[in-house]
Amino acid sequence: MATKPKTPRKATNNTIAEIARAHLAINTLETRNSDALDFHDVAVWKVNAALEAAYAAGIAAATTRDERTTDQKIDALRPGGTIELSRNDDGTRVFAERSGNGRMLRIVREFTDGTQILGYDIILDEVW
């Protein structure tokens, strides 16, 4: 039986709960409405270890390969936003940027020397 893929929020909550268990000896992060169960004395070195683990988990999540298609990346782009679509080994990259009012999408190739070549200017029928 195939398992349902985790949503990003569920995966984040699971990671946070695991860090709490592993580093802080807190078995659950659910509120249980009891001071004895909801408040914990924790050594500062354990808090430091938990924060380092959370930071490392955030870095790992941010560097995970983006599996979205180019169309999905562009569709998710909000007004005023920019997203990198590709990067070559020599540092040349292609990015998309949406205007502040959301009505124009620009696709640009940027070379390592900073030179930019406009690929497309697209006027959008709708703003999303």
Image: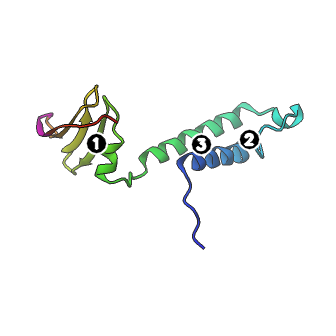
For the point 67% across and 48% down, which residue is it?
18
Please provide percent x and percent y for residue 33.
Answer: 85, 34
Please provide percent x and percent y for residue 105.
Answer: 22, 36
The residue closer to the viewer here, 96 or 38, is: 96
Q: Which residue is mark 2?
A: 29
Q: Which residue is mark 1?
A: 84
Q: Which image quadrant for residue 96?
A: top left
- On whether residue 115 falls in the magenta region, the answer is yes
| Measured Cα–Cα span from mark 2 to mark 1 | 36 Å
Q: Residues within 10 Å of mark 3 (few under 14, many from 20)?
A: some
Q: Which badge, 2 or 3, comes first in the chain's sequence?
A: 2
Q: Which residue is mark 3?
A: 53
Can you name the residue that lies furthest to the bottom here? 1
Can you name the residue that lies furthest to the top here? 100
The residue closer to the viewer here, 61 or 121, is: 121
Say above or below: 81 vs 11. Answer: above
The residue closer to the viewer here, 16 or 123, is: 123
Q: Which mark is residue 125?
A: none
Q: Which badge, 1 or 3, comes first in the chain's sequence?
A: 3
Q: Mark 2, mark 3: which one is toward the viewer? A: 2
Secondary structure of the residue carrying tag 2 is: loop
Highlighted magenta segment, given as a residue range: 114-120
Q: Residues within 10 Å of mark 2 (few under 14, many from 20)?
A: some
Q: Quadrant of the N terminus?
A: bottom right
Name which residue type carries label 2.
Answer: Leu
